[in-house]
Image: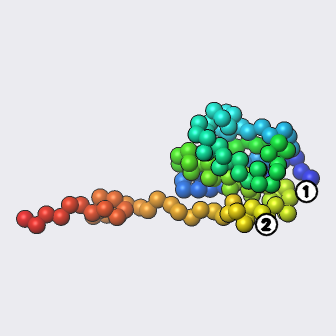
Amino acid sequence: MQEASAFKAIGRRKESIARVRLTAGSGGFIVNKKPLDKYFTKETERLVVKQPLQLTNTLDKFNIVANLTGGGFCGQAGALRLGISRALVMVDASFRDTLKQNGFLTRDPRMKERKKYGQKGARKRFQWTKR
């Protein structure tokens, strides 16, 4: 295990960016200056965020401070999960195999497709009229 005061990592998903700071502590979560429970109101989003810590059995060993910008809550939860996973790999390289097998170190490349000119949306066309 590498000795440092704080481990910083960035996670992204859709339009969301999560800047994560991992420090040794008792398992506290601060997201955008709020506790995790106040920021993510849905239980599924909180579970997604905690997945890498539960997998590596480090849920009560680190304090996490995160700044999230852009996107919605689901995208932000995914970005935070990636950021936490990357920070855990910096802490201990032996976590890498476990996290990679569960897909927590893979950046989800799916983005919103752009709207094209002459169309109503990305794929939808304007209504065609015969006469």
User: Tags 2 and 1 in contact by the CB under 8 Å rule?
Assistant: no
Given residues 120 and 94, the one toward you in this image is 94
Residue at 84%, 38% in the rendered image: 26
State the SS at label 2. Answer: helix
What's the amino acid at mark 1? Gln
- Splitting the image into 4 quarters, where does residue 96 fall? bottom right
Which of the two discs, 2 and 1, labels the residue nearer the N terminus?
Answer: 1
Question: Quadrant location of the N terminus?
Answer: bottom right
- Image coordinates for residue 56, horizontal then vertical, percent: 80, 54
Q: How is the image coloured?
A: rainbow
Given residues 127 and 15, the one toward you in this image is 127
Q: Is residue 58 visible?
A: yes
In the depicted structure, whether residue 35 falls above or below residue 70: above
Residue at 59%, 56% in the rendered image: 13
Residue at 62%, 48% in the rendered image: 77
Residue at 62%, 52% in the rendered image: 78
- Image coordinates for residue 130, horizontal then vertical, percent: 10, 67
Quick check: 124 left or right of 58?
left
In the depicted structure, whether residue 127 falls above or below residue 47: below
- Image coordinates for residue 32, horizontal then vertical, percent: 65, 38
- Image coordinates for residue 118, horizontal then vertical, percent: 27, 64
Q: Is residue 80 visible?
A: no
Query: Which mark, by number, is residue 110?
Result: none
Query: Which mark, by number, is residue 97?
Result: 2
Q: Residue furthest left?
A: 131
What's the amino acid at mark 2? Asp
- Splitting the image into 4 quarters, where does residue 120 fall? bottom left
Residue denoted by label 1: 2
